[in-house]
Amino acid sequence: MRATNIAARSEQCAGPAVGRAADARPPAPGPAMAPLIALSLGYFLVMLDVTVVNVAIPAIRTSFGTGATALQWIVDGYSTLFAGLLLLGGALADRIGHRRTFLAGLGVFALASLACALAGSPAVLIAGRMAQGAGAALLVPASFGLLQATYADRAARARAVAVWGAVASVAFGAGPVVGGLLVSGSGWRAVFWLNLPVAVLAVALTLRHLPPATRSRRQASKADPLGQLLGVIGLVALAGGLNEAGARGWTSPLVLSAFVLGIAALAALAAVERTLEARIRAGGRRAPLLPPSLFRAPSFTSTAAVGLLISLGYYGMLFLTTLYFQQERGFSALATGLALLPSVCMGLIAAPLFSRITARTGPYPPMVAGLALGTLGFLGWLPTGPHTPYPVLLFALIATGLGQTLTALAATAAIIDTAPAAGAGIASAVFNVSRQVGSTVGVALFGTFATAAPDFSAALRLSAGLAATAFATGALLALKARRRASTPYRAG
């Protein structure tokens, strides 16, 4: 899931200064709350449905009597379409307008949730989950663009990103707990009914408080249908192959075929985009879906790579630690969700910390600090065994959760600040694709370790070492990006 130094916040005087009132600078503006609530509610839906459905899977299996393959796609269909359509969603947001795309995403997500709640068969539920992923792919890039346009002041934008990210962190962390309560009280369909009032409120706030944008140069150019098709094929194939790799194995013919198709389509996309960019410089009208010049923007590529690395390390380890508490420690699903809360709910601490630091220093110092903290946290998992007391694990849980969330917020702010206004949607789409790919690779790879290792503790230690390496590598990239952050973006 993107170069800047955020202006320092003005200091308020402790008391009146006689004769110098005219020289006092006003405090930095805070973010307007109504549009921020609308954007946060949209992202809340996207993040909640990443985790809330996992808890409902046993009840869905009992309700439909379905097998493991269908259950896997009820979970993975969402992430596959989300990752696969992100570039298309970002391009649409930049072309037809961020508010219009955001509202379309909310509508698709709400209708898909209704279909899931009313599903009478596994096939309908899988189709609904895929449609939810399509709605999320419209929502997320558009919300990045709206954040950039709504909060022009960088200090206010840092605070807005902090609130927006904190809401997402709470949604992700609360998913297992909320899902457990809803399933036990009202059945598995309740996890989808919950989305409808949230989506309606987000639509109402968006229509009232987020004005439509003016027409941009990118909107006036012709679309890139071949690039859009290649992007969708490449990303869907790659995401689908990674999802299947965990269950079928990395050498499965289906998995290898998906990888070959995905890589070939993305290579063809790169060639098409280079050609279109060269033509548009010569006066052509067809704008590339993914301008190669975007990757020449200082710090953009490094920040996108940081997004991939933190998602690979954190979500891969989160998957493994969930198995650790359930399989090695015998925790129930609800108890496991509560045990993971010190990690997954760190947004409540990371958001105000990020806001205070970033408004003064820019996004890169907190990004480096978060990556360093996460590295130490993953190293804290190395001595863990099947009987390690839970209090001993708290440092690893808190440090990895706080480090990941602080880094993700900082990287989000950096991507938003780096992107040109006319390309905010596609820039955020690239960042979110990198995060989705990293998460899927981490879950598939660390899940393979858990299957192949002689014992689970060995797999946990190996995965923790790789996660620490990923975060340490990200810290080096963030330091490099910070040095380059003062160079402005130049399109073309």
Image (cartoon, grey):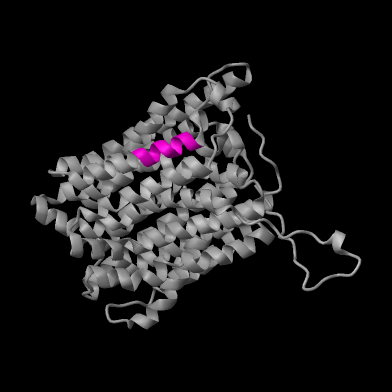
**Would you identify the image quadrant in which residue 259 lies?**
top left
Q: Is residue 257 left or right of residue 43?
A: left
Horizontal and vertical percent position of residue 114: 25, 44
Answer whether residue 101 is magenta in the image: yes
- Where 490 falls versus 454 (above or below)? above
* Residue at left offset 43%, top offset 69%: 378
**Would you identify the image quadrant in which residue 277 lies?**
top right
Q: Residue furthest left?
A: 65
Please say whether residue 390 is visible from this viewpoint.
Answer: yes
Q: Nearer the viewer, residue 143 or 245?
A: 143
- Looking at the magenta stretch, what is its main secondary structure? helix
**Would you identify the image quadrant in which residue 297 lies?**
top right
Q: Is residue 12 left or right of residue 79?
A: right
Q: Is residue 147 left or right of residue 338?
A: right
Q: Which portion, as a residue range, is magenta? A: 99-107
Horizontal and vertical percent position of residue 272: 48, 24
* Residue at left offset 48%, top offset 52%: 37
Q: Nearer the viewer, residue 68 or 272?
A: 68
Answer whether residue 88 is magenta in the image: no
Q: Give the position of the C terminus as an image quadrant.
A: top right
Horizontal and vertical percent position of residue 468: 46, 65
All told, the count of numbered labels is 0
Please say whether residue 455 is visible from this viewpoint.
Answer: no
Horizontal and vertical percent position of residue 13: 78, 69
- Where 413 falls versus 406 (above or below)? above
